[in-house]
Protein backbone atom coordinates (compact mmCIF):
# COMPACT_ATOMS: atom_id res chain seq x y z
CA UNK A 1 0.00 0.00 0.00
CA UNK A 2 2.77 2.41 0.92
CA UNK A 3 4.75 1.67 -2.24
CA UNK A 4 1.77 2.00 -4.58
CA UNK A 5 0.40 5.21 -3.07
CA UNK A 6 3.70 7.02 -2.80
CA UNK A 7 4.68 5.89 -6.31
CA UNK A 8 1.49 7.55 -7.51
CA UNK A 9 2.46 10.69 -5.63
CA UNK A 10 5.95 10.60 -7.13
CA UNK A 11 4.38 10.07 -10.55
CA UNK A 12 2.40 13.29 -10.10
CA UNK A 13 5.55 15.16 -9.08
CA UNK A 14 7.30 14.13 -12.29
CA UNK A 15 4.29 15.35 -14.27
CA UNK A 16 4.52 18.79 -12.64
CA UNK A 17 8.32 18.97 -13.10
CA UNK A 18 7.82 18.28 -16.79
CA UNK A 19 5.12 20.96 -16.88
CA UNK A 20 7.45 23.54 -15.29
CA UNK A 21 10.03 22.99 -18.03
CA UNK A 22 7.41 23.25 -20.78
CA UNK A 23 5.98 26.42 -19.21
CA UNK A 24 9.42 28.04 -19.16
CA UNK A 25 10.55 26.92 -22.62
CA UNK A 26 7.28 27.28 -24.53
CA UNK A 27 5.41 30.06 -22.74
CA UNK A 28 7.90 32.36 -20.98
CA UNK A 29 11.09 32.18 -23.10
CA UNK A 30 10.17 30.66 -26.48
CA UNK A 31 12.74 32.47 -28.68
CA UNK A 32 16.25 31.09 -29.41
CA UNK A 33 17.58 34.59 -28.64
CA UNK A 34 16.28 34.15 -25.08
CA UNK A 35 18.66 31.26 -24.32
CA UNK A 36 20.50 33.14 -21.52
CA UNK A 37 17.20 34.11 -19.84
CA UNK A 38 15.90 30.54 -20.22
CA UNK A 39 19.08 29.06 -18.72
CA UNK A 40 18.80 31.35 -15.70
CA UNK A 41 15.06 30.63 -15.32
CA UNK A 42 15.70 26.87 -15.44
CA UNK A 43 18.40 27.43 -12.81
CA UNK A 44 16.06 29.43 -10.56
CA UNK A 45 13.26 26.85 -10.68
CA UNK A 46 15.75 23.98 -10.41
CA UNK A 47 17.28 25.45 -7.24
CA UNK A 48 13.81 26.19 -5.84
CA UNK A 49 12.76 22.56 -6.35
CA UNK A 50 15.91 21.11 -4.74
CA UNK A 51 17.56 23.47 -2.24
CA UNK A 52 14.71 23.66 0.36
CA UNK A 53 14.24 19.89 0.06
CA UNK A 54 17.91 19.22 0.73
CA UNK A 55 18.66 21.86 3.34
CA UNK A 56 15.44 21.06 5.19
CA UNK A 57 16.37 17.39 5.45
CA UNK A 58 18.35 17.45 8.75
CA UNK A 59 15.44 19.15 10.54
CA UNK A 60 12.91 16.87 8.85
CA UNK A 61 14.88 13.77 9.83
CA UNK A 62 15.05 14.80 13.49
CA UNK A 63 11.31 15.54 13.38
CA UNK A 64 10.54 12.12 11.87
CA UNK A 65 12.50 10.32 14.62
CA UNK A 66 10.30 12.09 17.20
CA UNK A 67 6.81 11.86 15.65
CA UNK A 68 4.34 9.50 14.01
CA UNK A 69 5.51 8.92 10.45
CA UNK A 70 1.96 8.28 9.29
CA UNK A 71 0.85 11.75 10.40
CA UNK A 72 3.90 13.35 8.79
CA UNK A 73 3.13 11.66 5.47
CA UNK A 74 -0.54 12.60 5.71
CA UNK A 75 0.07 16.28 6.48
CA UNK A 76 2.87 16.72 3.96
CA UNK A 77 0.74 15.17 1.20
CA UNK A 78 -2.12 17.53 2.05
CA UNK A 79 0.25 20.53 2.06
CA UNK A 80 1.63 19.52 -1.32
CA UNK A 81 -1.89 19.14 -2.71
CA UNK A 82 -2.76 22.65 -1.49
CA UNK A 83 0.32 24.16 -3.15
CA UNK A 84 -0.51 22.37 -6.40
CA UNK A 85 -4.04 23.79 -6.27
CA UNK A 86 -2.66 27.31 -5.78
CA UNK A 87 -0.37 26.94 -8.81
CA UNK A 88 -3.30 25.72 -10.91
CA UNK A 89 -5.41 28.70 -9.84
CA UNK A 90 -2.67 31.22 -10.67
CA UNK A 91 -2.09 29.61 -14.07
CA UNK A 92 -5.79 29.72 -14.92
CA UNK A 93 -5.93 33.39 -13.92
CA UNK A 94 -2.72 34.09 -15.89
CA UNK A 95 -1.13 35.45 -12.71
CA UNK A 96 1.79 33.05 -12.33
CA UNK A 97 5.09 34.87 -12.82
CA UNK A 98 8.59 33.43 -12.51
CA UNK A 99 9.27 34.93 -9.02
CA UNK A 100 5.94 33.63 -7.67
CA UNK A 101 6.60 30.21 -9.20
CA UNK A 102 10.03 30.07 -7.55
CA UNK A 103 8.51 30.83 -4.12
CA UNK A 104 5.74 28.23 -4.51
CA UNK A 105 8.13 25.58 -5.80
CA UNK A 106 10.41 26.26 -2.83
CA UNK A 107 7.47 25.66 -0.47
CA UNK A 108 6.70 22.51 -2.43
CA UNK A 109 10.26 21.29 -1.91
CA UNK A 110 10.30 22.13 1.82
CA UNK A 111 7.14 20.09 2.41
CA UNK A 112 8.76 17.34 0.36
CA UNK A 113 11.68 17.26 2.82
CA UNK A 114 9.36 16.14 5.64
CA UNK A 115 7.59 13.70 3.34
CA UNK A 116 10.93 12.21 2.26
CA UNK A 117 12.32 11.87 5.78
CA UNK A 118 9.22 10.02 7.01
CA UNK A 119 9.00 7.88 3.89
CA UNK A 120 12.66 6.85 3.53
CA UNK A 121 12.94 5.79 7.17
CA UNK A 122 9.37 4.49 7.37
CA UNK A 123 9.50 1.63 4.92
CA UNK A 124 12.78 0.50 6.47
CA UNK A 125 10.74 -0.20 9.63
CA UNK A 126 8.08 -2.17 7.76
CA UNK A 127 10.45 -4.58 6.00
CA UNK A 128 12.61 -7.33 7.59
CA UNK A 129 16.37 -6.72 7.07
CA UNK A 130 16.70 -9.68 4.68
CA UNK A 131 14.10 -8.13 2.38
CA UNK A 132 15.57 -4.62 2.32
CA UNK A 133 17.44 -5.03 -1.02
CA UNK A 134 14.25 -6.02 -2.84
CA UNK A 135 12.19 -3.37 -1.06
CA UNK A 136 14.74 -0.74 -2.02
CA UNK A 137 14.70 -1.98 -5.60
CA UNK A 138 10.92 -1.50 -5.65
CA UNK A 139 11.25 2.00 -4.25
CA UNK A 140 14.03 3.03 -6.64
CA UNK A 141 12.14 1.53 -9.58
CA UNK A 142 9.32 3.93 -8.71
CA UNK A 143 11.51 6.77 -9.98
CA UNK A 144 12.02 4.94 -13.26
CA UNK A 145 8.31 4.16 -13.60
CA UNK A 146 7.51 7.81 -12.98
CA UNK A 147 10.08 9.00 -15.49
CA UNK A 148 8.78 6.45 -18.02
CA UNK A 149 5.07 7.17 -17.72
CA UNK A 150 4.88 10.77 -16.52
CA UNK A 151 6.29 12.57 -19.59
CA UNK A 152 3.80 11.06 -22.09
CA UNK A 153 0.94 11.79 -19.69
CA UNK A 154 2.22 15.33 -19.05
CA UNK A 155 2.61 15.97 -22.78
CA UNK A 156 -0.94 14.69 -23.34
CA UNK A 157 -2.37 16.86 -20.56
CA UNK A 158 -0.48 19.91 -21.80
CA UNK A 159 -1.71 19.26 -25.35
CA UNK A 160 -5.31 18.72 -24.22
CA UNK A 161 -6.55 22.24 -25.15
CA UNK A 162 -5.32 21.65 -28.70
CA UNK A 163 -7.18 18.35 -28.86
CA UNK A 164 -10.33 20.12 -27.67
CA UNK A 165 -10.19 22.75 -30.40
CA UNK A 166 -7.64 25.25 -29.10
CA UNK A 167 -8.17 28.98 -28.66
CA UNK A 168 -10.86 29.04 -31.33
CA UNK A 169 -13.24 26.89 -29.28
CA UNK A 170 -12.05 27.31 -25.67
CA UNK A 171 -12.06 30.29 -23.30
CA UNK A 172 -8.76 32.10 -22.87
CA UNK A 173 -8.17 30.73 -19.37
CA UNK A 174 -8.10 27.18 -20.81
CA UNK A 175 -5.76 27.96 -23.70
CA UNK A 176 -2.74 26.42 -21.91
CA UNK A 177 -2.61 22.79 -20.86
CA UNK A 178 0.01 23.35 -18.14
CA UNK A 179 -2.65 23.72 -15.39
CA UNK A 180 -3.97 20.22 -16.20
CA UNK A 181 -0.55 18.74 -15.36
CA UNK A 182 -0.40 20.47 -11.97
CA UNK A 183 -3.99 19.42 -11.25
CA UNK A 184 -3.02 15.78 -11.85
CA UNK A 185 -0.15 16.23 -9.39
CA UNK A 186 -2.50 17.63 -6.75
CA UNK A 187 -4.89 14.71 -7.16
CA UNK A 188 -2.04 12.23 -6.74
CA UNK A 189 -1.14 13.83 -3.41
CA UNK A 190 -4.75 13.64 -2.21
CA UNK A 191 -4.98 9.94 -3.10
CA UNK A 192 -1.66 9.23 -1.36
CA UNK A 193 -2.92 11.02 1.76
CA UNK A 194 -6.08 8.89 1.84
CA UNK A 195 -4.09 5.64 1.59
CA UNK A 196 -1.67 6.71 4.33
CA UNK A 197 -4.56 6.90 6.82
CA UNK A 198 -4.81 3.08 6.65
CA UNK A 199 -1.11 2.43 7.37
CA UNK A 200 0.38 1.92 10.83
CA UNK A 201 4.14 1.95 11.33
CA UNK A 202 5.63 -0.25 14.08
CA UNK A 203 6.87 1.67 17.11
CA UNK A 204 10.55 2.53 17.25
CA UNK A 205 12.73 0.75 19.80
CA UNK A 206 13.59 2.81 22.90
CA UNK A 207 16.13 5.53 22.25
CA UNK A 208 19.59 5.00 23.72
CA UNK A 209 20.02 8.74 24.21
CA UNK A 210 17.42 8.93 26.95
CA UNK A 211 18.33 12.46 28.05
CA UNK A 212 15.67 14.91 26.97
CA UNK A 213 16.97 17.01 24.07
CA UNK A 214 15.52 19.62 21.76
CA UNK A 215 14.86 18.89 18.11
CA UNK A 216 18.00 20.89 17.28
CA UNK A 217 19.89 18.61 19.65
CA UNK A 218 18.62 15.68 17.57
CA UNK A 219 19.81 17.42 14.42
CA UNK A 220 23.28 17.79 15.96
CA UNK A 221 23.20 14.14 17.05
CA UNK A 222 22.61 13.09 13.45
CA UNK A 223 25.62 15.07 12.30
CA UNK A 224 27.76 13.73 15.17
CA UNK A 225 26.85 10.14 14.31
CA UNK A 226 27.98 10.72 10.72
CA UNK A 227 31.13 12.70 11.46
CA UNK A 228 32.44 10.04 13.86
CA UNK A 229 32.31 7.41 11.09
CA UNK A 230 34.77 8.38 8.36
CA UNK A 231 33.93 5.51 5.95
CA UNK A 232 30.34 6.77 5.90
CA UNK A 233 31.68 10.22 5.03
CA UNK A 234 33.56 8.68 2.10
CA UNK A 235 30.33 7.15 0.77
CA UNK A 236 28.54 10.45 1.26
CA UNK A 237 31.35 12.29 -0.57
CA UNK A 238 30.70 10.11 -3.61
CA UNK A 239 27.04 11.06 -3.42
CA UNK A 240 28.16 14.69 -3.38
CA UNK A 241 30.30 14.11 -6.47
CA UNK A 242 27.56 12.48 -8.52
CA UNK A 243 25.00 15.12 -7.57
CA UNK A 244 27.40 17.92 -8.49
CA UNK A 245 28.25 16.43 -11.87
CA UNK A 246 24.83 14.98 -12.77
CA UNK A 247 22.99 18.26 -12.08
CA UNK A 248 24.01 19.85 -15.44
CA UNK A 249 22.33 17.05 -17.40
CA UNK A 250 19.09 17.27 -15.42
CA UNK A 251 19.05 21.07 -15.64
CA UNK A 252 20.03 21.52 -19.28
CA UNK A 253 18.11 18.63 -20.85
CA UNK A 254 15.31 20.94 -22.11
CA UNK A 255 17.92 23.16 -23.77
CA UNK A 256 19.66 20.17 -25.34
CA UNK A 257 16.38 18.82 -26.72
CA UNK A 258 15.30 22.21 -28.04
CA UNK A 259 18.59 23.35 -29.59
CA UNK A 260 21.06 20.46 -29.89
CA UNK A 261 18.42 18.11 -31.36
CA UNK A 262 16.58 20.80 -33.36
CA UNK A 263 17.62 19.59 -36.84
CA UNK A 264 16.87 15.93 -36.10
CA UNK A 265 13.54 16.82 -34.46
CA UNK A 266 12.54 18.76 -37.57
CA UNK A 267 13.59 15.83 -39.78
CA UNK A 268 11.26 13.50 -37.85
CA UNK A 269 8.46 16.05 -37.33
CA UNK A 270 8.80 16.04 -33.53
CA UNK A 271 7.78 19.06 -31.48
CA UNK A 272 9.85 20.11 -28.48
CA UNK A 273 7.27 18.70 -26.05
CA UNK A 274 7.07 15.37 -27.89
CA UNK A 275 10.86 14.97 -28.09
CA UNK A 276 11.35 15.90 -24.43
CA UNK A 277 8.66 13.41 -23.41
CA UNK A 278 10.21 10.72 -25.62
CA UNK A 279 13.78 10.96 -24.28
CA UNK A 280 12.54 11.19 -20.68
CA UNK A 281 10.34 8.14 -21.16
CA UNK A 282 13.18 6.12 -22.70
CA UNK A 283 15.43 7.13 -19.80
CA UNK A 284 12.71 6.04 -17.38
CA UNK A 285 12.45 2.70 -19.16
CA UNK A 286 16.18 2.23 -18.55
CA UNK A 287 15.72 2.96 -14.83
CA UNK A 288 12.83 0.47 -14.60
CA UNK A 289 14.72 -2.30 -16.39
CA UNK A 290 17.80 -1.64 -14.24
CA UNK A 291 15.65 -2.20 -11.17
CA UNK A 292 14.06 -5.34 -12.62
CA UNK A 293 17.42 -6.85 -13.49
CA UNK A 294 18.82 -6.12 -10.03
CA UNK A 295 15.67 -7.54 -8.42
CA UNK A 296 16.18 -10.81 -10.32
CA UNK A 297 19.96 -11.11 -10.16
CA UNK A 298 20.73 -9.40 -6.84
CA UNK A 299 24.21 -8.30 -5.82
CA UNK A 300 25.74 -11.77 -6.38
CA UNK A 301 28.14 -11.37 -3.49
CA UNK A 302 29.80 -8.26 -4.97
CA UNK A 303 30.69 -5.69 -2.34
CA UNK A 304 28.22 -2.85 -2.53
CA UNK A 305 30.89 -0.15 -2.39
CA UNK A 306 32.75 -1.63 -5.40
CA UNK A 307 29.43 -2.09 -7.17
CA UNK A 308 28.45 1.55 -6.57
CA UNK A 309 31.71 3.16 -7.76
CA UNK A 310 31.64 1.01 -10.92
CA UNK A 311 28.11 2.20 -11.63
CA UNK A 312 29.08 5.82 -10.99
CA UNK A 313 31.89 5.51 -13.54
CA UNK A 314 29.41 4.13 -16.08
CA UNK A 315 26.96 6.97 -15.36
CA UNK A 316 29.71 9.51 -16.08
CA UNK A 317 30.49 7.87 -19.42
CA UNK A 318 26.78 7.73 -20.27
CA UNK A 319 26.40 11.44 -19.52
CA UNK A 320 29.26 12.23 -21.92
CA UNK A 321 27.47 10.28 -24.66
CA UNK A 322 24.20 12.12 -23.97
CA UNK A 323 25.92 15.48 -24.33
CA UNK A 324 27.62 14.48 -27.58
CA UNK A 325 24.41 13.20 -29.20
CA UNK A 326 22.87 15.20 -32.06
CA UNK A 327 20.03 12.83 -32.96
CA UNK A 328 16.96 11.97 -30.92
CA UNK A 329 17.72 8.24 -31.22
CA UNK A 330 21.33 8.55 -30.01
CA UNK A 331 20.31 10.93 -27.21
CA UNK A 332 17.56 8.56 -26.01
CA UNK A 333 19.82 5.50 -26.23
CA UNK A 334 22.59 7.17 -24.20
CA UNK A 335 20.07 8.37 -21.61
CA UNK A 336 18.62 4.82 -21.42
CA UNK A 337 22.07 3.38 -20.69
CA UNK A 338 22.78 6.06 -18.07
CA UNK A 339 19.46 5.66 -16.25
CA UNK A 340 19.80 1.85 -16.37
CA UNK A 341 22.62 2.22 -13.84
CA UNK A 342 20.90 4.73 -11.53
CA UNK A 343 18.35 2.39 -9.89
CA UNK A 344 20.94 -0.30 -8.94
CA UNK A 345 23.21 2.48 -7.63
CA UNK A 346 20.54 3.96 -5.36
CA UNK A 347 19.38 0.51 -4.26
CA UNK A 348 22.88 -0.48 -3.16
CA UNK A 349 23.35 2.80 -1.31
CA UNK A 350 20.04 2.67 0.57
CA UNK A 351 20.46 -1.00 1.46
CA UNK A 352 23.91 -0.35 2.90
CA UNK A 353 22.70 2.61 4.96
CA UNK A 354 19.55 0.92 6.25
CA UNK A 355 21.37 -2.27 7.21
CA UNK A 356 24.15 -0.50 9.12
CA UNK A 357 22.28 2.37 10.83
CA UNK A 358 20.59 1.81 14.25
CA UNK A 359 16.78 2.05 13.89
CA UNK A 360 16.43 4.93 16.37
CA UNK A 361 18.93 6.96 14.30
CA UNK A 362 17.64 5.94 10.88
CA UNK A 363 15.70 9.07 9.89
CA UNK A 364 18.40 11.41 11.20
CA UNK A 365 21.28 9.52 9.58
CA UNK A 366 19.51 9.19 6.22
CA UNK A 367 18.54 12.87 6.30
CA UNK A 368 22.06 14.05 7.15
CA UNK A 369 23.38 11.81 4.39
CA UNK A 370 20.94 13.30 1.89
CA UNK A 371 21.76 16.80 3.09
CA UNK A 372 25.52 16.36 2.72
CA UNK A 373 25.29 14.54 -0.62
CA UNK A 374 22.41 16.29 -2.31
CA UNK A 375 23.35 19.81 -1.26
CA UNK A 376 25.76 19.60 -4.18
CA UNK A 377 22.83 19.35 -6.62
CA UNK A 378 21.63 22.97 -6.32
CA UNK A 379 25.28 24.06 -6.35
CA UNK A 380 25.82 22.12 -9.58
CA UNK A 381 22.57 23.53 -10.92
CA UNK A 382 23.64 27.13 -10.27
CA UNK A 383 27.12 26.60 -11.71
CA UNK A 384 25.78 24.84 -14.81
CA UNK A 385 23.11 27.49 -15.37
CA UNK A 386 25.65 30.29 -15.04
CA UNK A 387 28.06 28.65 -17.51
CA UNK A 388 25.27 27.65 -19.93
CA UNK A 389 24.16 31.27 -20.15
CA UNK A 390 27.40 31.93 -22.06
CA UNK A 391 28.53 28.53 -23.40
CA UNK A 392 26.78 25.72 -25.33
CA UNK A 393 24.83 23.46 -22.97
CA UNK A 394 26.21 20.25 -24.46
CA UNK A 395 29.79 21.20 -23.57
CA UNK A 396 28.78 21.76 -19.93
CA UNK A 397 27.13 18.32 -19.80
CA UNK A 398 30.07 16.52 -21.46
CA UNK A 399 32.72 18.08 -19.20
CA UNK A 400 30.72 17.28 -16.04
CA UNK A 401 30.24 13.65 -17.11
CA UNK A 402 33.93 13.26 -17.90
CA UNK A 403 34.95 14.63 -14.50
CA UNK A 404 32.57 12.18 -12.76
CA UNK A 405 34.01 9.21 -14.68
CA UNK A 406 37.63 10.25 -14.03
CA UNK A 407 36.97 10.80 -10.31
CA UNK A 408 35.51 7.29 -9.94
CA UNK A 409 38.30 5.67 -11.96
CA UNK A 410 40.88 7.30 -9.68
CA UNK A 411 39.12 5.91 -6.59
CA UNK A 412 39.04 2.38 -7.97
CA UNK A 413 42.83 2.50 -8.44
CA UNK A 414 43.46 3.82 -4.93
CA UNK A 415 45.14 1.45 -2.40
CA UNK A 416 42.71 -0.18 0.02
CA UNK A 417 39.64 0.57 -2.11
CA UNK A 418 38.36 -3.01 -1.86
CA UNK A 419 38.23 -2.88 1.96
CA UNK A 420 35.91 0.13 2.24
CA UNK A 421 32.73 -1.82 2.94
CA UNK A 422 34.45 -3.77 5.74
CA UNK A 423 35.57 -0.45 7.22
CA UNK A 424 31.99 0.81 7.07
CA UNK A 425 30.76 -2.18 9.05
CA UNK A 426 33.47 -1.64 11.66
CA UNK A 427 32.56 2.05 11.92
CA UNK A 428 28.87 1.22 12.32
CA UNK A 429 29.70 -0.82 15.41
CA UNK A 430 31.34 2.15 17.19
CA UNK A 431 29.33 2.89 20.38
CA UNK A 432 27.47 6.19 20.40
Image (cartoon, helix red, strand yellow):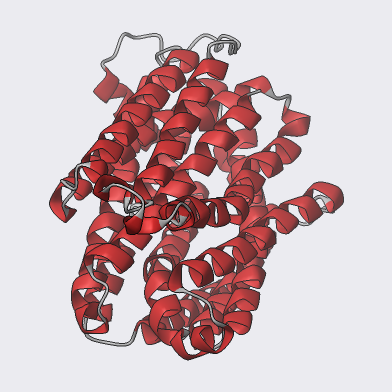
Classify residue 338 as left or right of residue 24.
Answer: right
Figure disc tally: 0
Spot occupied by residue 360 in the image (x, y as percentages of width and height): 51, 20
Q: In this picture, is 370 found above or below 264?
A: above
In this rendering, position of residue 116 left or right of residue 384: right
- Above or below, 397 against 223 in this view is below
Q: Is residue 340 left or right of residue 82?
A: right
Residue 388 in view (yes/no): yes
Quadrant hosting residue 57: top left
Residue positioned 76% across, 32% down in the render: 131
| Residue sitting nearer the eye, 118 or 236 | 118
Quadrant of the image occupied by residue 377:
bottom left
Please name whichever residue, 340 or 182, is drawn nearer the observer in this view of the structure.
182
The residue positioned farthest toward the front in the image shown: 169
* Residue at horizontal 52 percent and vertical 25 percent from the top: 192
Q: Residue 299 placed where, x, y %? A: 79, 52
For the N terminus, the image quarter is top right
420 in relation to 399, above or below: above
* Residue 6 placement (x, y as % from top left): 56, 31
Task: Name the residue located 31 percent from the left edge and 8 percent from the top edge.
Answer: 212
- What x and y, as percent, mark residue 389? 22, 79
Q: 54 or 87: which is nearer to us?
A: 87
Give 24 or 288, whichever is nearer the viewer.
24
**Residue at position x 21%, y 49% in the image:** 102
Residue 361 in view (yes/no): no
Amino acid sequence: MLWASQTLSLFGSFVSQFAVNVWLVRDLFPLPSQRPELALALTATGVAMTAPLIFGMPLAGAFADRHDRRLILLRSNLALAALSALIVLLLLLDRLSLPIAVVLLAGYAFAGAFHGAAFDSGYGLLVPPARLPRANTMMMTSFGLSQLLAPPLAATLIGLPGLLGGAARLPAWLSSGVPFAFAADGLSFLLAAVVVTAIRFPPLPPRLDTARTSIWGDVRAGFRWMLRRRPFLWLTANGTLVNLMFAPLMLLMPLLVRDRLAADRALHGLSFEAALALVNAVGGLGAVLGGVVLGIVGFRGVKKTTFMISLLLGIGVGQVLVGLSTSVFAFAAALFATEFLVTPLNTASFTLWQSLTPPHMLARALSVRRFLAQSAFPVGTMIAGWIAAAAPAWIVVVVAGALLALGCAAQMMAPGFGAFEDRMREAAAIPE
